[in-house]
Amino acid sequence: MFKNLINGEWLDGHGVARNINPSDTRDLIGEYAQADAAQAELAITAATAAFPAWSLSTPQQRFDILDAVGTEILARRAELGDLLAREEGKTLPEAIGEVVRAGNIFKFFAGEALRPGGESLPSVRPGVGVEVTREAVGVVGLITPWNFPIAIPAWKIAPALAWGNCVVFKPAELVPGSAWALAEILSRSGLPAGVFNLVMGRGSVVGEKLLNDPRIAAVSFTGSVATGQKVAAACTARMAKFQLEMGGKNPMVVLDDADLGVAVNAAVNSGFFSTGQRCTASSRLIVTEGIHDRFVAAMVEKMQALKVDDARKAGTDIGPVVDANQLGQDLDYIGIAQADGGRLVQGGQRLEHNADGAPGFYLTPALITDTTPDMRINREEVFGPVVSVLRARDFEHALALANDTPFGLAAGIATTSLKHATHFKRHSQAGMVMVNLPTAGVDYHVPFGGRKGSSYGPREQGRHAAEFYTTVKTAYTQA
């Protein structure tokens, strides 16, 4: 039994969740405590009591703790990566890469604790000085998704602690293992009791408490659009700060002048790696007429060589879908696309077992051509290894198709034209734009976030994270 961490103590829950390996559903990773509303209340109370002292802690104290956490994560990358691949289903190299990213995030924000910034300005009035400083917001509720079970918690927890906030952390129910491992490292880092609290449990119980308790000053959420809208409504009603990351329907434009190999590699990486379960995945490929047929043929050839198997097995390119519900959703969307007139040219088959005969949630990556902008496959986020292709007349048409979406997280273009690349970067209605690169794959020291239905509030990661986790104070002094 893996317990919740509340006020520095490991506590049993009021229920149990079983963590199952999607590569082999016979493999039970562990049983994880489920908190009830009373335990969530206890965690909020502990964080509230710890905040006055922690918010006034020295930058050196916060640096030392966060740097030590980052060091341990990096030292245990193989072990933690194996756990991550086992519970979430991304391949072992991808999982280890995510762990390394989490360690680097903690080290980056350790440095930010020493660089809080601020301004000293002369007033417009004689003899008056002005200081502009940043202070911690208070107790923050952090709600994270299942697709990046250690990196996304890291990029919320690390800046929250770096700037003196206290944390109540609710991870996704599907992937408690990586969250618990991170919490266990934090529990030995030197943090005072109550500064960081892990409360595993259902969103309808723990999540609701975080949204509605007046002592939670801010909520950072990554997940579905529907849940994000509930977060926004609850926080707005009580004037709490909130930050939302809610997914995308990201386009990758491929122009006639593109290097075919570069374009195919970027599209396969964006659409299918991590089993397509990335909010930055390119699920819409918008291809101009002159290269369309060659590009589709090259995509099919590349996809046929992809190995779908156990996430932790050497040589696996694509691991399983995270669970049965997500697998069912992926298959439903493939059927919907075909019913709407799309043509399944590669993949899309359910595999009941892997190469060793172990039962799992396997799906061969699917490529669907002959689609139109109004089809559901091009309007709604699937969140799996399912990619559609749209044919465009020229660059202008491709740009219009790329922007024709209620989302705006990431967008990519494959081209050798500086003119078109520059124009696309400026006119793409997305928060992140990639040229001749996969849309999925971002750095930890620069802002992350999108526009339209993808994101709301200040950006995550990098120095821009301060906009959410701090509040600005302006002080005037007459000598």
Image (cartoon, helix red, strand yellow):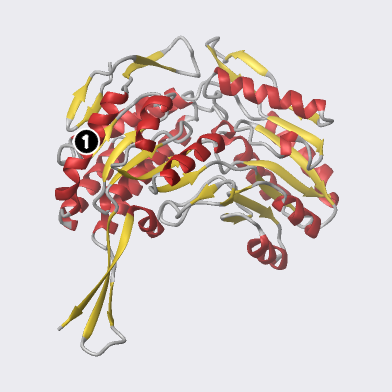
Q: Residues within 10 Å of mark 1 (few under 14, many from 20)?
A: some
Side of 168 relative to 261 (left or right): left
Residue 251 x %, y %: 67, 47
Q: Quadrant of residue 380?
A: top right
Side of 318 relative to 467 (left or right): right
Looking at the figure, which quarter contains the N terminus? top left
Q: Residue at x 63, y 51 (%)?
A: 411
At numbered mark 1, what does the secondary structure look like: helix, strand or loop? Answer: helix
Residue 437 x %, y %: 60, 51
Side of 320 relative to 56 (left or right): right
**Tag 1 residue:** 45
**Residue 82 drawn above or below residue 134:** above
**Residue 455 drawn above or below residue 24:** below
- What is the tally of numbered marks visible in this picture? 1
Residue 208 x %, y %: 40, 31
Q: Residue at x 67, y 50 (%)?
A: 262
Task: Looking at the picture, tell me which residue is in the foreground, 67 or 470.
Answer: 470
Q: Residue at x 67, y 62 (%)?
A: 427
**Furthest residue toward bottom:** 126
Side of 99 relative to 22 (left or right): left
Task: Looking at the picture, tell me which residue is in the foreground, 129 or 455.
Answer: 129
Q: Quadrant of residue 370?
A: top right
